[in-house]
Image (cartoon, helix red, strand yellow):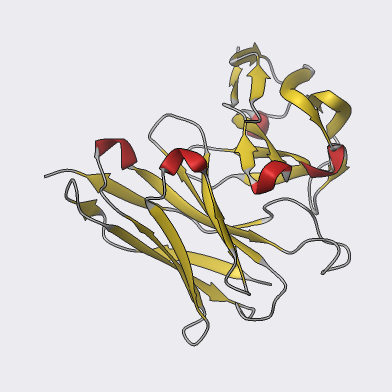
Amino acid sequence: ELVLTQSPGTLSLSPGERATLSCRVSQRVSSSYLAWYQQKPGQAPRLLIYGASSRAAGIPDRFSGSGSGTDFTLTISRLEPEDFAVYYCQHLGTSLMYTFGQGTKLEIK
Amino acid sequence: QVQLQESGPGLVKPSQTLSLTCTVSGGSIGSGRYYWNWIRQPAGKGLEWIGRIYTSGTSHYNPSLRSRATISLDTLKNLFSLNMTSVTAADTAIYYCATYCPPGVCPGSYDAFDIWGQGTKVTVSS
């Protein structure tokens, strides 16, 4: 069973700072199927990154994704007030099972 | 642009069957282009993928649900449904439907859930 482990659980930063979120996968996976989502309270998740490093339509370029194999990273270069939310990584594809990480909460320091 | 809207009872009694529908607009569920998914999220917790169905009727499920979940299509009504049997309090959650069209079918699209419904809250309680 594929397990996605996100760290840290909570990240406390100030607007203008850089955020680095990690997603570690329990086995090597194709980066083609690694995605990142943002979820704000009371809202459905929103796709940010697909294929590990490609931004979805309308996503600001301060959001970037990287990584391969078992280690993936979401970076927000300069935090805006609207970026404070919960972030999930997801892998689509192994054994026809879609798996989410447990999430990282990005909060205002 | 495809849009999704979940609906169903907000309250279900323990041991009964939870039934939800996801109505699709802006596209045909029978077009053979999309994978139709259900995901849930208990209050204050993370996202759990429940299962998916393709236009052919082929479906796949999260093994953790131990065969309690069934997803079906209604092409005449342009919706897909989730039935979950023998519910307990642990099934209390917001239930989302979501979809995507793989890049091999829809050039320029993504292998990721780019379309979500707004979610519907389900409470399991007597």
- At 74% across and 20% down in the image, what residue appears? A22
Place of residue B51 in the rendered image (x, y in percent of width and height, measured from the top left):
53, 52
Q: Nearer the viewer, residue B23 or A48?
A: B23
Place of residue B72 in the rendered image (x, y in percent of width and height, measured from the top left):
47, 69
Above or below, comparing residue A87 to residue A5 in the picture: below
Q: Nearer the viewer, residue B110 or B84?
A: B84
* Res. A40 image quadrant: top right
Q: Nearer the viewer, residue B59 or A45?
A: B59
Q: How many marks?
A: 0
Place of residue B105 in the rendered image (x, y in percent of width and height, measured from the top left):
82, 69
- At 17% across and 43% down in the image, what residue appears? B125
Above or below, comparing residue A90 to residue B122 in the picture: above
For the question of whether residue B75 can be seen, the reply is: yes
Place of residue B4 in the rendered image (x, y in percent of width and height, measured from the top left):
54, 66
For the question of whether residue B37 can be seen, the reply is: no
| Quadrant into which the N terminus of chain B falls | bottom right
Q: Nearer the viewer, residue B109 or A109?
A: B109
- At 39% across and 36% down in the image, what residue appears? B42
- At 85% across and 37% down in the image, what residue appears? A31
Side of A81 where B119 appears, left or right: left
Side of A77 where B47 appears, left or right: left
| Quadrant into which the C terminus of chain B falls | top left
Outermost residue, left side:
B126
